[in-house]
Amino acid sequence: MAAIPSGVLGALDSTSDRAVFRQIADQLREAIDKGRFKEGAKLPSESELVEHYGVSRMTVRNALSVLQGEGLVHSEHGKGVFVRPRPPVRRLASDRFARRHRDQGKAAFTVEAEAAGSHPEVDSLEVKEERPTQDVSARLGGPRRVLARRRRYLLDGRPVEFATSYLPLDIARGTPIAEPNPGPGGIYARLEELGHRLDHFEEEIRARMPTPGEVKFLRLAAGVPVIHLIRTAFDTEGRPVEVCDTVMAADAYVLAYQLPAT
Amino acid sequence: MAAIPSGVLGALDSTSDRAVFRQIADQLREAIDKGRFKEGAKLPSESELVEHYGVSRMTVRNALSVLQGEGLVHSEHGKGVFVRPRPPVRRLASDRFARRHRDQGKAAFTVEAEAAGSHPEVDSLEVKEERPTQDVSARLGGPRRVLARRRRYLLDGRPVEFATSYLPLDIARGTPIAEPNPGPGGIYARLEELGHRLDHFEEEIRARMPTPGEVKFLRLAAGVPVIHLIRTAFDTEGRPVEVCDTVMAADAYVLAYQLPAT
DNA sequence: CACGCATACTCGTATAGACGAGTGGGCGAG
DNA sequence: CTCGCCCACTCGTCTATACGAGTATGCGTG
């Protein structure tokens, strides 16, 4: 068992009334913040920390679990505990649905990811008619059934986003929108071709911890929240024509908006 | 020690290879989701769960810590573990900085909170000149020193938001902006009076787990992320005149934006 | 009645030990 | 040399125990 390099981690203050596992967590956090452990680097193993601090293993694990909850580190069974690297971030600009971005042959996600040098994928496509939740129904003006389009987006093999679009059946049924691949420009381009000229979007943003299902589906590390975005698209007559419910891995996204000062 | 009402929690599946503490967490989560434990209600105590499942206390605590990490429950020393109630949510609309909202005598936060029937407070006011971080300096066009205005917002006694505004000294020094109370309409009203007519704002939104300092200052429960919002205000000449860095308790906010479909 | 204390409950912290399972490197057999 | 096994190391799960500290309740004393 290798010793911990001296100077990287200090000693415990037995006179302090701060819990031992918190003191250990504090020291590890400070060492990470100061770059003494770099991104992706392996922390000392649990048994090394037990040795160094002269405490029991549960105390060390408790300290490490604090850092995991903060999203600072992640553990890999059989390997060790590592400083969590910050993944490449996808920036969502508020003009991403502007009409001028809609006339390419590929989906916006694909174009943008390739421009950033990443490898984009879309999977888990599911398109079916179903009963909407109360919330979705209310946002769409109360339809009893809707078309739901589900898909998951991946960047360089990592799932980053899970999105479901809901459209009223009288708009979507029997159109390319009900096909797995709606064609160039996505469903917004199709909606406009069908005579539903888009006027504006409303977006609601929340952040919360993921459900176990989201953890699994997005392969989220401990301590990574999700951004929950609900977008409603309105046509020029003020009718809501689509609701898109999106759950994003928070460490993979920055949302950017531009607001007029009017 | 009271027994757990039958039917609320099931038994463990010893044939499953799912860890015992996860099975216990699953059952508690399901019971909460199905409303068998209501918001604010007390869960069975650790020793009751130990009794019910026939496992050791650490296993039960492990299960409870899973639910805490998900933000589903919170524990109170000496009292018990409770289903975390959803706090009242403050909705931030994208037109909240519109000029028409600026002519009242009170700050926007106060007006809005009182309209919603809440009791608003602002504290920890600090106004001083300082060296900006590299990021803030870059956003403001590179000043070496800035005026920083820090304040914390509370709703019904609960801290919900911590904000710092940064302004270039050549704009703010010696003006009402450098006073603790900048007067009706806030600093945006003052900026316009000083000839910096506002054109638009840019907002960047991230979500992440809070730092220990943020947990303390916002009195955050375990499993509550923060929304980190950075707003830059631009005048009609395209000059950035203010950067506002805001950290919000994610369970207290919904951000709403309206985007044109142009 | 009012106050204070004892007590029984709650969760928080910490120890010591055990076994299991994933990973990777070294060594020996072919 | 290559393949496969074994072993050492990693973290994951679980038990049993102990003491400390915060909270609420009730009872007994003044």
Image (cartoon, coloured by chain):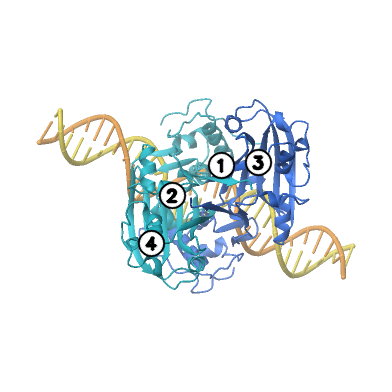
Chain colours: A cyan, B blue, C orange, D yellow
Q: Residue at x 56, y 33 (%)?
A: A30
Dot 2 corresponds to which residue?
A99
Could you say which disc has been placed on residue A21 in the image? 1
User: Do the residues at pointers 4 and 2 share their chain?
Assistant: yes
Pick whichever, A29 or B101, lies toward us.
B101
The answer, for residue B102, to whether it is visible in the render is: yes
Q: Are marks 2 and 3 in contact (CB under 8 Å)?
A: no
The answer, for residue A230, to whether it is visible in the render is: no
Could you say which disc has been placed on residue A194 in the image? 4
User: Do the residues at pointers 2 and 1 share their chain?
Assistant: yes
The N terminus of chain A sits in image quarter: top left
How far apart are the alpha carbons under marks 4 and 2?
A: 15 Å
Mark 4 residue element: loop
How far apart are the alpha carbons under marks 4 and 1?
A: 62 Å
Pick whichever, B39 or D5, lies toward us.
B39
Camera-side mark, 2 or 1 = 2
Pick whichever, D17 or B79, lies toward us.
B79
How far apart are the alpha carbons under marks 3 and 4?
A: 39 Å
Tell me the crowding category of disc 2: few under 14, some 14 to 19, or many 20 or more residues within 10 angstroms, Cα based.
some
Chain ID for label 1? A
Dot 3 corresponds to which residue?
B198
Amino acid found under the numbered disc labelled 4: Leu
How far apart are the alpha carbons under marks 2 and 3?
A: 27 Å
How far apart are the alpha carbons under marks 1 and 3?
A: 50 Å
Residue A184, x across and y down, in percent: 33, 51
Amino acid found under the numbered disc labelled 1: Phe
Of mark 4 and mark 1, the one earlier in the sequence is 1
Chain ID for label 4? A
